[in-house]
């Protein structure tokens, strides 16, 4: 137990800057960060099940479950997706509590991501490539929107608009270091698109994302851009996968989704794994329990 470290109420403001919490920042190992991420996933899973909300494990968390019945050894976050109606229900009905806080652009001032994050209070996650409000160790919650199978142009336009939004409002100068072209794009888009409110910009994008129907489901806010799509049939129901002895829902057609995004997802990569940032525990208790 650490001593001499003050705590501050997490209910002081909806725009709480986790980076401004007083006290020592205690670095978390990857394993400790993963334990907290699973704790967040369990909170999310319990809420969804008790409220009849359907979600699907995707990304590295799903690949880890399929390969190892665990998280990938280098993975420092967990991604889930939800069809738009379930996503809006969750964001509307989830109530923050003493251990967890939901970040959305509507709820938290300065939070500029188009997807939601469920965050473990008392932690800090520093993401060098982002310039929005600091948050804690998290699970990413991303909406799936319908798109016509035969009209790729509509989806491509929206993916481009999301990329432009991220350059204007989200990514930091660190994210474009080493590329004069990307740095210039960031400056130009920041000077033009950045004149408007990021909240109104996301709201306009969401309106466009939800105005079509069709046989594809698309994750417009995903890191892999146009790869993040699959047939609606792939998300018609769920199958269970295991992580550390616990069962979580995955899309019944997970193979189609993972193949579109990653290709041969069952073969481990040969390059260096990508880490999103650095995790810290804030306050007195450094035991992560």
Image (cartoon, rainbow, N blue to C red):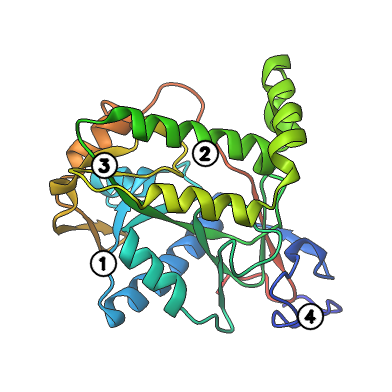
Position of 142 with respect to 55 (left or right) is right
In the figure, residue 151 lies in which quadrant?
A: top left
The answer to whether any part of residue 233 appears in the image is: yes
* Real-space CA distance between mark 2 and mark 3, rounded to the nearest whole angstrom: 31 Å
Q: Which mark is residue 67?
A: 3
Residue 269's place in the image compared with 44, above or below, is above
Disc 1 target residue: 54
- The residue most toward the top is 180
Q: Quadrant of the C terminus?
A: bottom right
Most foreground residue, 18 or 154: 154
* Real-space CA distance between mark 4 and mark 3, rounded to the nearest whole angstrom: 41 Å
Pointer 2 local density, CA inside 10 Å: few below 14, some 14–19, many at least 20: many
Q: Tell me the mark number nearer the camera, choosing from 4 and 2.
A: 2
* Real-space CA distance between mark 4 and mark 2, rounded to the nearest whole angstrom: 35 Å
Earlier sequence position, callout 4 versus callout 2: 4
Residue 164: where, in percent of width, then height? 59, 33
């Amino acid at each position: 137990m650490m001593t001499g470290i003050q705590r501050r109420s997490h209910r002081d403001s909806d725009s709480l800057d986790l980076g401004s919490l007083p006290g020592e920042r205690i670095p978390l190992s990857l394993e400790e960060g993963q334990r907290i991420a699973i704790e967040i996933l369990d909170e999310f899973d319990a809420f969804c099940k008790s409220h009849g909300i359907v979600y699907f494990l995707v990304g590295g968390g799903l690949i880890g479950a399929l390969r190892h019945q665990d998280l990938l050894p280098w993975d420092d976050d967990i991604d889930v997706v939800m069809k738009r109606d379930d996503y809006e229900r969750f964001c509307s009905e989830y109530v923050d509590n003493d251990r967890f806080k939901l970040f959305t652009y509507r709820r938290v001032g300065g939070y500029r991501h188009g997807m939601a994050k469920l965050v473990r209070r008392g932690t800090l996650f520093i993401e060098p490539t982002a310039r929005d409000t600091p948050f804690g160790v998290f699970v990413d919650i991303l909406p799936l929107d319908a798109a016509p199978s035969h009209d790729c142009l509509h989806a491509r336009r929206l993916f481009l608009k999301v990329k432009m939004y991220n350059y204007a409002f989200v990514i930091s100068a660190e994210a474009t270091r080493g590329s004069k072209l990307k740095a210039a794009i960031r400056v130009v888009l920041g000077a033009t698109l950045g004149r408007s409110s990021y909240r109104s910009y996301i709201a306009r994008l969401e309106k466009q994302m939800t105005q079509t129907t069709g046989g594809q489901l698309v994750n417009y806010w995903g890191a892999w851009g146009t790869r993040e799509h699959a047939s609606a049939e792939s998300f018609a129901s769920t199958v269970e996968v295991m992580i550390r002895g616990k069962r979580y829902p995955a899309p019944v057609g997970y193979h189609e989704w993972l193949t579109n995004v990653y290709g041969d997802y069952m073969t481990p990569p040969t390059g260096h794994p990508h880490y999103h940032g650095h995790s810290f525990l804030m306050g007195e208790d450094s035991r992560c329990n």
